[in-house]
Image (spheres, grey):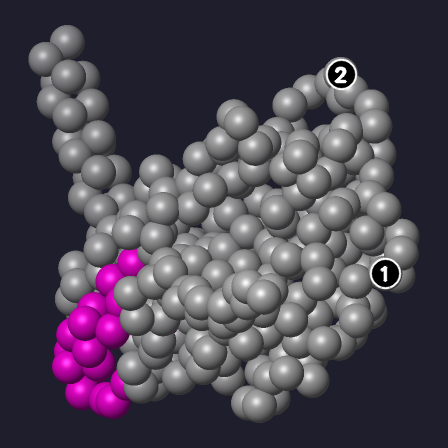
């Protein structure tokens, strides 16, 4: 009986040793070399895993940075320029600084300006509502107000205003990850260059209907009249599909376009109050 036990132990031991040898050679044959710099780059990144860089998490972004050997068109919006400078130092290459960006909502169609024509009675999801019908107002391009963008934001930078029914963005918390941009089925949210003192000028409208139709559905809709384009001296404004667009890279924040817009579709934020020019008052003349 004892002999059988000894033989069993020896047999199992030999099988174990043989399996270990086979596994060792298989591991050596198929092992994948991983550049140790990937760990260093990943440690430098903020670890938000938000996908704002365009890749599935910080590890994937670090892998791409190392494998490419250059940082052209690669940027971490959470870490910003300081983070990318650290990554460049690890890889021994140069990087180009990028202007910080912030999300803006291109819809100003509150209930005051864009009255509801029907009531949506379904799942509170912009994606679902958009696939079912054009919306609960006369503007098929406006915000649906279900809050998909708010749910997508992991940085508490975006909230739905219960009074206006529109999303509002906190510039201090927004890190331009782009999650809200992807979440909006109406493509109402876009990334724009962050100007000094968080000043912004943009067309808060995406309605591409002709002027009369757009104005009928929303009183602050862009009607594509072109007055802003004519007023701009910096070629920052273009008109396409009955809709004006202001290029944040070219805009000098002069605010002249805001003054000439007949529908107040152009928004100016975080500017000091405009100076009010006193009208000349003619002195009253008494009749003798």
Question: Which residue reaches farthest top?
Answer: 1
SS for dot 1: helix
Q: Quadrant of the N terminus?
A: top left
Is 185 a magenta residue? no
Task: Please state the horizontal and vertical placement of residue 154, each as a whole percent of the image.
Answer: 37, 40
The magenta span reads 75-95
Where is residue 52 shown, x and y percent of the image? 42, 58
Q: Is residue 144 visible?
A: yes
Residue 201: mark in rendering: none
Residue 127 appears in view: no
In the displayed structure, 50 sits above or below 60; it is above
Residue bearing the label numbered 1: 211
Of residues 79 and 105, the one drawn nearer to the viewer in this rendering: 105
The residue under the point 83% across, 28% down is 117
Among the 4 quarters of the image, the one containing residue 212 = bottom right
Point out the frontmost of discs 1 and 2: 1
Q: Of residues 266 and 16, which is closer to you in this image?
A: 266
Left or right of residue 176: residue 118? right
Q: Tell me what residue is drawn at x 27 percent, y 44 percent.
A: 19
Residue at left offset 25%, top offset 38% = 15
**SS label for mark 2:** loop
Q: Along the horizontal axis of the image, is 54 left or right of 173?
A: right
Q: Is 187 situated above or below 241? A: above
Q: Position of residue 221 (x, y in %)?
A: 73, 54
Give the spatial CA distance, label 1 vs label 2.
30 Å
Instruction: Work out which quarter of the rendered image holds the C terminus and state it.
Output: bottom right
Residue 82 colored in magenta in the image: yes
Q: Which residue is mark 2?
A: 121
């Amino acid at each position: 009986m004892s002999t059988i036990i000894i033989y069993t132990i020896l047999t199992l031991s030999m099988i174990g040793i043989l399996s270990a040898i086979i596994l060792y050679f298989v591991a050596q044959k198929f092992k994948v070399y991983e550049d140790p710099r990937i760990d260093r780059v990943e440690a430098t990144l903020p670890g938000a895993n938000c996908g704002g860089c365009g890749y599935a998490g910080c590890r994937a972004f670090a892998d791409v940075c190392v494998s490419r050997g250059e940082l052209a068109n690669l940027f971490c919006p959470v870490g910003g320029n300081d983070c990318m400078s650290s990554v460049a130092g690890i890889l021994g290459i140069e990087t180009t600084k990028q202007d910080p960006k912030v999300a803006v909502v291109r819809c100003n169609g509150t209930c005051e300006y864009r009255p509801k024509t029907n009531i949506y009675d379904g799942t509170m999801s912009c994606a679902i509502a958009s696939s079912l019908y054009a919306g609960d107002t006369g503007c098929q391009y406006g915000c649906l107000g279900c809050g998909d963008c708010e749910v997508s934001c992991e940085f508490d930078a975006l909230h739905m205003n219960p009074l206006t029914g529109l999303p509002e963005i906190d510039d201090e918390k927004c890190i331009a990850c782009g999650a809200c941009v992807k979440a909006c089925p109406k493509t109402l949210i876009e990334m724009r260059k962050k100007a000094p003192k968080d000043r912004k000028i943009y067309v808060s409208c995406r309605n591409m209907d002709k002027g009369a139709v757009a104005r009928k559905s929303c009183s602050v809709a862009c009607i594509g009249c072109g007055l802003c384009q004519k007023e701009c001296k910096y070629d920052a404004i273009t008109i396409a599909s009955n809709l004006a667009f202001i290029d944040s890279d070219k805009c000098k924040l002069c605010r002249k376009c805001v003054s000439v817009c007949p529908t107040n579709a152009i928004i100016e934020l975080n500017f000091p109050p405009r100076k009010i020019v006193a009208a000349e008052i003619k002195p009253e003349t008494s009749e003798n």
